[in-house]
Amino acid sequence: MKPIKWSDLLISIGIAELVGVLSAVLSGNSWGFYKELSRPPFSPPGIVFPIVWVILYALMGISAYLIEQSKSPEAEKQKALRIYAAQLFLNFLWSIVFFRFELFGLSVIIILTLLFLVALMIYSFYKIEPPAAYLNIPYFLWLVFAAYLNIGIVILN
């Protein structure tokens, strides 16, 4: 096993976390807005979301670090990391579309596309470094739940 390059690992986690912070800032008053919505059953209180997302972004960053550090061919790693970047961009975009612009229908399209990209990312990560793929399973499952919430909000509002 290769020694951990702590600075690279922290940069990878930091990039993912920064995407989340920027998205939250650009989303506006999501706390107040979320409370006003009619929500489907099993909707968690708003405080749950930032806690879960901090953990998920950290796991994403760790998984990207594992891919970058793997001994796989550079072209294969870069292809997987491009999928990672694309899903991270859609993740960033979703909150802004949903909370800032209140475009619930478009946000459903984005989150379903995001689910597809995350599944593709998990598959590509698995071929390179299986633990990197496993780290993203909670993210995928949370996105399934978020898609349910998003679709429920579209129906109820």
Image (cartoon, rainbow, N blue to C red):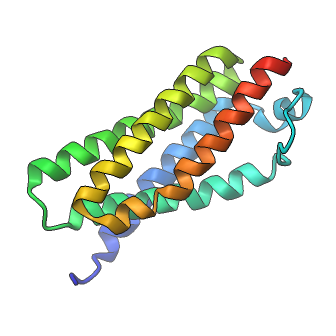
State whether residue 11 appears in this view. Answer: no
Residue at x 50%, y 61% (from the top left corner): 58
Is residue 77 shown left or right of residue 136?
A: left
* 1 or 35, nearer to the observer: 1
- The quarter of the displayed image where residue 147 is located: top right
Is residue 34 shown left or right of residue 89?
A: right
In the picture, the quarter occupied by the C terminus is top right
State whether residue 118 appears in this view. Answer: yes
* 153 or 85, nearer to the observer: 153
Task: Judge whether 79 appears above or below 2 on screen.
Answer: above
* 30 or 73, nearer to the observer: 73
Residue at x 62%, y 49% (from the top left corner): 142
Residue at x 49%, y 44% (from the top left corner): 19
Is residue 144 shown left or right of residue 68?
A: right
Task: Judge whether 63 appears above or below 88 on screen.
Answer: below
In the picture, the quarter occupied by the N terminus is bottom left
Residue 13 in the image: x percent, y percent? Answer: 43, 61
How many numbered badges does the structure rendering display? 0
Residue 70 in the image: x percent, y percent? Answer: 20, 66
Residue at x 52%, y 55% (from the top left corner): 57
Task: Judge whether 74 appears above or below 69 on screen.
Answer: above
Residue 78 in the image: x percent, y percent? Answer: 18, 47
Is residue 93 shown left or right of residue 26?
A: left
Task: Judge whether 110 appears above or below 135 on screen.
Answer: above
